[in-house]
Amino acid sequence: MTPITVRRWAWVHKWSSLVCTVFMLLLCVTGLPLIYHHEIDHLLGNAIEAPAMPADTPRASLDDVIAAGKALYPNKVAMYLSQEPDDASIWYLTMGDHPTDEAFKSVAVDARTAKVLGEPSFEGSFLGVMFHLHVDLYAGLWGKLFLGFMGLLLVIAIISGVVLYAPFMRKLEFGEVRRERGPRVKWLDLHNMLGIVTLTWAFVVGATGMINTWADLMLKYWQATEMAEMVAPYKGMPAPTRLGSMQKSLENAVAAEPGMKIGFVAFPGTPFTSPHHYGIFMRGDEALTSRLYKPVLIDAQTTEITDRRNLPWYLTGLLISQPLHFGDYGGAWMQFLWAALDVITIFVLGSGLYLWLKRGAPAPARAAAPARIEEQGTPVLATEGEAR
């Protein structure tokens, strides 16, 4: 590349990195405990566990499960019903004053005895704080979109860092750290080496994180298009005053989609269905397909299926990106790998910020010849400091 081209790429890398680095540090620090959220819940004693029973213990009717929640909160309506993908012994029933109540209550009910096991506490907990700081900065949709923009800047910083890496580092062996040149050059070489090592992971996590911030917008678009088509025959009809059996609805959905399991159930009036339908979202049973849902709409009065179809490509992409972002696909080893790479990325971002703050070179030195630029190198993924 010509010196002018190098300077242009260095400018892109510097400013994209500087703007997003502090927020990326926040996301890496808050994302680390979220990788192990199940384990931390157990460690803190917040996890709710069902009593051990034989594997062939019959399951309770979903109508009884819902009745258990209603007995606890008789003035609230059911909003959602779900299970963890790896634990079918507990149903989590979400209840609110109305179908879109953000101050909802969550009730854990034993799937075999229909007895209330407890009420999971998430808001205000350690993991709840980490989650909000990581997802929306407690600012709702605008917080998500802002963090999505920071993710875009990270992707730009990664790409520009890759472009700059070869010309700036071609005189050094891969992984070489020049300790004899002083602490700043040593930190610079460590920053470059670890930045290029974590390149793919940082790009994947940054890109999937950016996609995840668009989830609310994608859902609204799906509601306005495909969901509207699915419920069009009910347009203008009054909402039902009595709801049919959830257990019967579940059985009809399972019969229509053999080989699939229940992912979650949306009750009438919630964003995932209509005022006239149960939305039963089926999922596969493989590592990948367990994250992909297929909506089956059930008439909430007759319990008969009215429509079912695969999700559009953009929601499929979103659902694939979510577990990939947190390393949920490959069990404990993938969690460990994600956590280790997260820690390394924290070092890369922190060292880049350090190099920028300690740049301190006078203007003539920063405008040195390309040969000097190649010798000093440039930080990858964060800032290039005086090395530019």
Image (spheres, helix red, strand yellow):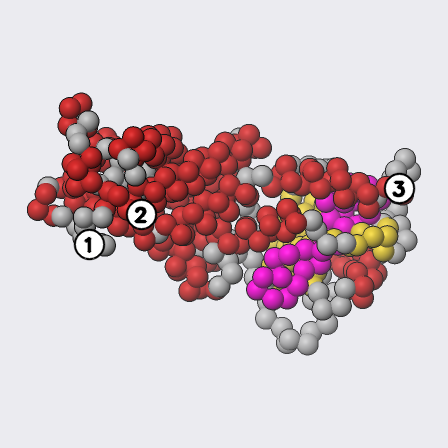
State the SS at label 3. helix
Q: Is residue 343 left or right of residue 69?
A: left
In the image, the segment drawn in magenta is 265-294
- Of badges 2 and 3, the one in the foreground is 2
Relative image position of residue 298 (x, y in whole percent):
83, 53
Q: Earlier in the sequence, mark 2 or mark 3?
A: 2
Q: Residue at x 77, y 43 (%)?
A: 227
| Quadrant that contains the N terminus | top left
Label 1: state its secondary structure: loop
Residue holding disc 2: 195
**Which residue is outermost to the left?**
180
Left or right: where 379 falls relative to 301: left
Q: Is residue 358 magenta?
A: no
Front residue of 305/155: it is 155
Q: 264 or 119: nearer the eye? A: 264
Residue 173, numbered circle:
1
